[in-house]
């Protein structure tokens, strides 16, 4: 970062690197993005230096060259329910310590000066060494999203030995019992959950939510009786990179649930259509391979995911079959290949047309599936 006297836009500003970049550097992990906090400045001063304001709720600016975020030091006060129910105060008299105390966890409340000096008023570095996720202040409870964020950080760092501090777990439970989680936007809940599902230990996220009573607010379908089965299911994933790891994990997570429960959960979380579809098709695949293969069952499976117009969708589910029931993979792959090879043009040349053509295509595909299954069992 440029020092005072340089010609760069931040020259002369009291700027600190903050948050995840500092935390991950201390952990020896790669740092991909930097966030900065500016103390003692005004929005007008930032604009005059070429910074571009973004958003309406927070005084955040983009650096004119790097496009990294520079936020004015600010304080927040609870003014309503949920994640967005805050009033923000940013002015030159807000100190760095004032800004850091509003953050969620001590490991995220460390700042780094341009000369590399760490500003750590709340013990974040000690908590990193102790492998502990601990809230900065009682203001943690004002933002219910922090319950999910803390659980998500556990999913990321549990493999390094991190745990949630007892006092923070107690505060997470207090927030859960307050009913504030219900005021979160579904999109925010899914965003945190999607990130957690992409972390090294996604099961830690759901266990942490279960332990503090937060699971029932948004994931009631993952009851005490099904959570173990759901978390076990996410350990079995196909080698098919067309879908994000988090989306495969979600699909497998909800596979043990009944169809009505899966649909209810998808609607509550307002899932993207592609994720909800992947979950539905993956559940159908799991049901298919649990029983003996029949022509009717295989055809229903292929038709149900519109395999004929979306062959890659079928290929993805065949990849799942390969890990769930490898002994059935060859038969199902052959069945799909042969059924997909049925040519409507050939049948039209034989005189079929209109509704009769559609019926004959279905018959011919069923016959192809039957031959493949018979060949595999011979």
Image (cartoon, grey):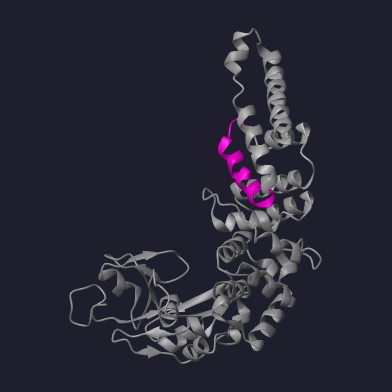
**Residue at far front of view:** 378
User: Magenta residues: mostly which secondary structure?
Assistant: helix
Q: Is residue 296 above or below residue 38?
A: above
Image position, residue 54 (x, y; %): 40, 64
The image quadrant that residue 46 belongs to is bottom left
Quadrant in the picture for residue 9:
bottom left
Task: Give the vertical position of 256 relative to 370 (above or below).
Answer: below
Q: State which region is magenta.
A: 307-325
Q: What x and y, as percent, mark residue 157?
A: 54, 76
Q: Quadrant of the C terminus?
A: top right
Compared to residue 167, the image places residue 10 above or below, namely above
Q: Quadrant of residue 365?
A: top right
Q: Residue at x 72, y 63 (%)?
A: 219
Does residue 53 appear to the left or right of 109 in the view shown?
left
323 with respect to 116 (left or right): right
Q: Is residue 73 visible?
A: no
State the image coordinates of residue 238 (x, y, percent, origin top left).
60, 52
Toward the viewer: 181 or 254? 254
* Residue at image point 59% right, 25% down: 341
Question: In front here: 237 or 207?
Answer: 237
Query: In the image, residue 192 lies at what x, y percent?
Result: 58, 65
């Amino acid at each position: 970062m440029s020092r005072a006297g340089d010609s760069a836009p931040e020259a002369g500003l009291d700027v600190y690197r903050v948050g995840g970049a500092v935390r991950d550097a201390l952990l020896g992990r790669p740092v991909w993005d930097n966030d900065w906090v500016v103390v003692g400045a005004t929005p007008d001063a930032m604009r005059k230096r070429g910074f571009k304001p973004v958003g309406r709720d927070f005084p955040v600016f983009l650096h004119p060259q790097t496009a990294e975020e520079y936020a004015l030091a600010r304080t927040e006060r609870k003014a309503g329910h949920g994640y967005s129910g805050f009033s923000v105060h940013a002015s030159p008299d807000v100190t760095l310590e004032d800004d850091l105390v509003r953050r969620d966890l001590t490991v995220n409340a460390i700042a780094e000066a341009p000369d590399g000096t760490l500003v750590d008023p709340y013990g974040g570095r000690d908590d990193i060494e102790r492998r502990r996720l601990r809230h900065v202040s009682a203001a943690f409870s004002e933002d219910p999203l922090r319950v999910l964020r803390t659980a998500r950080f556990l999913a990321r760092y549990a493999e390094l030995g991190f745990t949630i501090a007892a006092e923070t777990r107690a505060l997470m439970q207090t927030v859960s019992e307050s009913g504030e989680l219900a005021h979160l936007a579904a999109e925010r809940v899914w965003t945190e959950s999607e990130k957690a599902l992409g972390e090294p230990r996604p099961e830690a996220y759901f266990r942490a939510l279960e332990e503090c009573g937060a699971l029932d607010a948004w994931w009631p379908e993952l009851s005490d009786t099904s959570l173990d089965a759901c978390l076990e299911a996410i350990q079995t994933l196909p080698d098919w990179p067309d879908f994000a790891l988090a989306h495969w994990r979600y699909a497998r997570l909800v596979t043990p649930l009944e169809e009505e429960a899966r649909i209810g959960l998808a609607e509550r979380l307002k899932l993207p259509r592609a994720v909800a579809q992947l979950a539905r098709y993956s559940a159908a695949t799991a049901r298919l391979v649990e029983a003996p293969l029949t022509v009717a069952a295989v055809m229903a499976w292929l038709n149900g995911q519109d395999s004929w117009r979306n062959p890659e969708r079928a290929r993805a589910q065949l990849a799942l079959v390969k890990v769930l029931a490898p002994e059935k993979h060859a038969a199902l792959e052959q069945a799909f290949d042969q059924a997909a090879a049925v040519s409507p043009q050939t049948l039209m040349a034989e005189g079929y047309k209109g509704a009769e053509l559609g019926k004959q295509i279905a018959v011919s595909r069923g016959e192809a599936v039957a031959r493949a299954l018979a060949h595999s069992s011979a």
